[in-house]
Image (cartoon, rainbow, N blue to C red):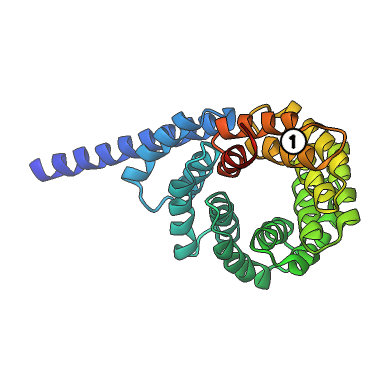
């Protein structure tokens, strides 16, 4: 009789625990859906503590951590799933997004090579690999990947900016400017697009146009240190601006901790 009672009590506890975890999982899912990522992570932590093999909760916790900018922690969760061969493609994409944010571009390329071998037309994979190729200076490979992305979605702003940067680094300035302008037609308030376009003008020694384009980047982001530095360099080279204006930019950029600007202040500005 006592043994039967103990078994009944144990079964009841297990059932109550399962019900509690089900409710907690639903609560976590709702937090994630509502964008309350910190609460979602806390709720998924409770689920995973009791059910460490719950792949669904591990994936969603990784997604919430990624949204919070906790890229190393999110990477660890996605990595668990990849190694377990659970939800592999989405987990590999998540892992590579985190690697990209952690500036580990070579590892993104390795990951996406594997994924694209299995799924050659995966657009997110092509975009991640193409943008990583841009960062590593493999400009031809970057353009090839990003061309495929933009044939499917010609309004993909990140792909346009990255392809423009690859064109610029490959010596195709006019094509780069076309991509940056296309990105700005879609999202007019992108300081990085103006900055990159200004760099193309600067490299082609169109210093006045460069200064005016860096100015647009600065208006959108008044703390854009590198844009101040480059505008200062452009102003030094353009006959339409004074050295005092250039020095004002270098000093502002130096105040924002740009090391190049600090050296320019020492060298050219009193």
User: On the rendered image, what quadrant is the C terminus found in?
Assistant: top right
Q: Residue furthest front?
A: 270
| Rendering quarter of residue 248 | top right
Compared to 5, does 146 lie above or below? below
Compared to 249, does 148 lie above or below? below
Query: Residue at the spot x=84%, y=40% of the render?
Result: 238
Q: Residues within 10 Å of mark 1 (few under 14, many from 20)?
A: many
- Judge from the rendering whether residue 121 lies leftward or rightward of residue 109; answer left or right: right
Q: Nearer the viewer, residue 212 or 151?
A: 212
Q: Residue furthest bottom?
A: 117
Count of labels in the image: 1
Whole-percent x and y of residue 258? 57, 39
| Rendering quarter of residue 236 | top right
Q: Is residue 261 visible?
A: yes
Judging from the image, what secondary structure is the residue with disc 1 in? helix
Query: Residue at the spot x=43%, y=32% of the render?
Result: 23
Q: Is residue 1 visible?
A: no
Whole-percent x and y of residue 18? 36, 40
- Judge from the rendering whether residue 179 lies leftward or rightward of residue 114; answer left or right: right
Whole-percent x and y of residue 91? 55, 56
Q: Nearer the viewer, residue 53 or 83?
A: 83
* Pointer 1 residue: 191
Whole-percent x and y of residue 88? 55, 61
- Judge from the rendering whether residue 23 lies leftward or rightward of residue 218; answer left or right: left
User: On the rendered image, what quadrant is the N terminus found in?
Assistant: top left
- Judge from the rendering whether residue 21 lies leftward or rightward of residue 139; answer left or right: left
Q: Nearer the viewer, residue 37 or 126?
A: 126
Query: Residue at the spot x=50%, y=60% of the render?
Result: 86
Query: Residue at the spot x=80%, y=57% of the render?
Result: 168
């Amino acid at each position: 009789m006592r043994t039967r009672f103990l078994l009944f009590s144990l079964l009841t506890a297990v059932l109550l625990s399962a019900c509690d975890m089900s409710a907690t999982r639903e609560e976590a899912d709702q937090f994630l859906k509502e964008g309350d990522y910190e609460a979602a992570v806390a709720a998924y932590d409770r689920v995973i503590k009791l059910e460490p093999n719950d792949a669904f909760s591990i994936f969603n916790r990784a997604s919430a951590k990624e949204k919070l900018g906790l890229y190393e922690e999110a990477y660890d969760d996605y990595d668990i799933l990849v190694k377990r061969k659970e939800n592999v493609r989405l987990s590999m994409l998540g892992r590579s997004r985190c690697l990209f944010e952690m500036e580990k571009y070579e590892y993104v390329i390795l990951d996406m090579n594997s994924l694209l071998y299995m799924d050659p037309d995966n657009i997110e994979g092509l975009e991640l690999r193409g943008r990583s190729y841009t960062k590593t200076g493999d400009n031809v490979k970057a353009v090839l990947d990003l061309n495929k992305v933009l044939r499917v979605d010609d309004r993909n702003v990140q792909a346009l900016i990255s392809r423009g940067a690859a064109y610029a680094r490959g010596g195709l300035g006019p094509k780069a400017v076309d991509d940056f302008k296309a990105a700005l037609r879609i999202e007019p308030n992108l300081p990085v697009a103006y900055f990159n376009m200004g760099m193309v003008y600067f490299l082609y020694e169109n210093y006045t146009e460069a200064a005016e384009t860096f100015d647009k980047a600065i208006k959108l982001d008044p703390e854009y240190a590198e844009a101040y530095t480059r505008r200062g360099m452009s102003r030094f080279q353009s006959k339409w601006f004074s050295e005092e204006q250039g020095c004002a930019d270098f000093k502002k950029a130096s105040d924002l901790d740009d090391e190049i600007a600090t050296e320019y202040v020492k060298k050219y500005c009193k």
